[in-house]
Image (tube, rainbow, N blue to C red):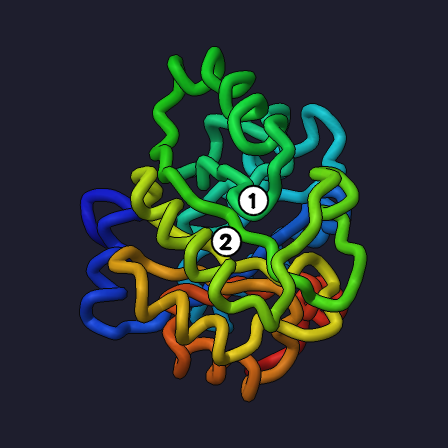
Amino acid sequence: MSKTILEFIQKASIKGEKLLAILLDPDKTSLEKLPEISSKIENLNANFIFVGGSFVKNGITDLFVEMLKKHTKLPVILFPGDFSQLTNHADALLFLSLLSGRNPEYLIEQQIKSVPFLKNSALEIIPTGYILIDGGTNSSVLKTSKTKPIPQKNIELAVDTAVAGMYKGKQLIYLEAGSGAKFPVNSQLISAVKKHITIPLIVGGGIKTKEQLNNAYKNGADLVVIGTAFENNPSFKF
């Protein structure tokens, strides 16, 4: 792997190599099943394991990641719902700003609360613009952030939001249809955003089939994240 996880993602994007991450929610995944789950993730040829959730109890993430690292060599990247989900046992942190919402708590307040921990941490910190797209359900992210997603048909707003994030210095843009989304981010929206940014694009939420996965890749996703589909059926294959 490259010197940093971000460099690895950037180089893959330039080369057109597609990446896969499996998202594990510590509140929905038992510690006892981590050895088996880790093996199944590696069999999927995933590149990363994301760890996080909207309602993870304080302290669980630290123990969860510590145990997970004992059973996998894959890089573990934190995808936190709030600052309490930080742990030094992970390899990197998506330092998220919820660009699609206007709630200051998730634009800057949570980030400030994380600084006392991060100042003394060896985590690789990756500035990431996080954009919620309507996935047809009232996802846990929407409930927590108290914000509205960007409608799938409002491609111009999604593009402008992504470009604004890039201009603000974000190193990744993450289009998210939400946990348990009824449908993923549509191909036109993915394609439009990809055409207007020069940084890697992550897409997640609502992807349940190989066809949907390939569609996201075909339209410009550099990294696709699978969460609920894996939670519901850890034995699934693309």
Quadrant position of residue 12: bottom left
Q: Quadrant of the C terminus?
A: bottom right
User: Left or right: where does residue 191 sit relative to residue 27?
Assistant: left
Pinpoint residue 96: horizontal percent, then vertical percent. Answer: 49, 39
Nearest the viewer among 175 and 196 is 196
Q: Residues within 10 Å of mark 2 (few under 14, many from 20)?
A: many
Residue type at mark 2 is Ile
Nearest the viewer among 77 and 194 is 194
User: Left or right: where does residue 188 sit relative to residue 140?
Assistant: left
Q: Going 60% across and 54% down the picture, which residue do you hit?
A: 132
Pinpoint residue 68: horizontal percent, then vertical percent. Answer: 56, 44
Q: Is residue 14 visible?
A: yes
Nearest the viewer among 77 and 185 is 185
Residue type at mark 1 is Leu
The mark tally for this picture is 2
| Residue denoted by label 1 | 68
Q: Going 20% across and 60% down the picture, which residue do you hit?
A: 11
Dot 2 falls on a residue whose secondary structure is: strand
Q: Which mark is residue 183?
A: none
Instruction: Indicate which disc, 2 or 1, sits on the residue closer to the N terminus.
Output: 2
- Please tell me whether residue 46 is drawn above or below residue 85 in the rendered image: below
Q: Going 63% across and 24% down the picture, which residue do you hit?
A: 84
Q: Is residue 32 visible?
A: no
Nearest the viewer among 36 and 128 is 128
| Residue denoted by label 2 | 49
**Residues under numbered marks 2 and 1 in contact, where contact means CB atoms less than 8 Å apart:** yes
- Please tell me whether residue 198 is drawn above or below residue 71 in the rendered image: below
- Please tell me whether residue 162 is drawn above or below residue 216 in the rendered image: above
Could you give the CA–CA distance between mark 2 and mark 1, rounded to whole angstroms?
A: 10 Å
- Please tell me whether residue 208 is drawn above or below residue 102 in the rendered image: below
User: Left or right: where does residue 234 sit relative to residue 104?
Assistant: right
Pinpoint residue 14: horizontal percent, then vertical percent. Answer: 20, 66
